[in-house]
């Protein structure tokens, strides 16, 4: 459902038209908008759109403020930076505490 909605947006259809003609619920649409409201209510830092580019980018596309290609360009043009804000400069120590990735054999045993 969400994938079909995304594909239709990518083909240039508007979200209102998609929702009006779909017989299924695309729960990602209201969820994306709710996430923006939640972030805005909890995070009062300057330029939160830079801190959460995908959340705000998806909402902008749904609201017709940018095209999917413009959203893609925006995310891909951001400079590389550490995005694990809660860990600060101690992210290496956090990685050491994380479990090691599973091997292919361990995955097969599941």
Image (cartoon, rainbow, N blue to C red):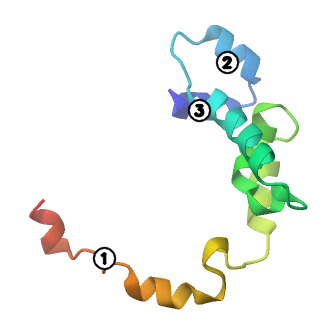
Please name the residue that numbered disc 1 is placed on.
101
Q: Quadrant of residue 44?
A: bottom right
- Separation of marks 1 and 3 at Cα, in angstroms: 29 Å
Residue 37 relative to residue 66: left or right:
left
Residue shown at the point (65%, 27%) measured from the top left: 30
Asked if the residues shown at circle 1 and circle 3 are in contact, with their CB atoms under 8 angstroms apart, the answer is no
* Residue 48, horizontal then vertical, whole percent: 83, 57
- Separation of marks 2 and 3 at Cα, in angstroms: 13 Å
Asked if the residues shown at circle 2 and circle 3 are in contact, with their CB atoms under 8 angstroms apart, the answer is no
Earlier sequence position, callout 1 versus callout 2: 2
Residue 27 relative to residue 11: left or right:
left
Is 71 situated above or below 75?
above
Query: Does residue 69 appear in the picture of this structure?
Result: no
Earlier sequence position, callout 2 versus callout 3: 2
Residue 83 image label = none
Is 33 situated above or below 100?
above
Q: Quadrant of residue 13?
A: top right
- Label 3, secondary structure: give it: helix
* Residue 20, horizontal then vertical, whole percent: 67, 9
- Label 1, secondary structure: give it: loop
Please name the residue that numbered disc 3 is placed on.
28
Q: Quadrant of the C terminus?
A: bottom left
- Label 2, secondary structure: give it: helix
* Crowd band around label 1 with a 10 angstrom C-alpha radius: few (<14), some (14–19), many (20+): few
Residue 18 image label = 2
């Amino acid at each position: 459902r969400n994938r079909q909605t995304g594909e239709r947006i990518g083909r240039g259809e508007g979200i209102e038209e998609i929702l009006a003609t779909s017989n299924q619920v695309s729960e990602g649409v209201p969820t994306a908008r709710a996430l923006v409201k939640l972030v805005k209510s909890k995070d009062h830092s300057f330029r939160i759109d830079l801190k959460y580019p995908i959340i705000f980018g998806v909402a902008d596309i749904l609201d017709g403020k940018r095209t999917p290609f413009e959203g893609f360009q925006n995310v891909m043009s951001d400079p590389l930076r550490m995005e694990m804000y809660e860990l600060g400069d101690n992210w290496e120590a956090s990685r050491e505490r994380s479990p090691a990735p599973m091997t292919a054999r361990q995955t097969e045993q599941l």
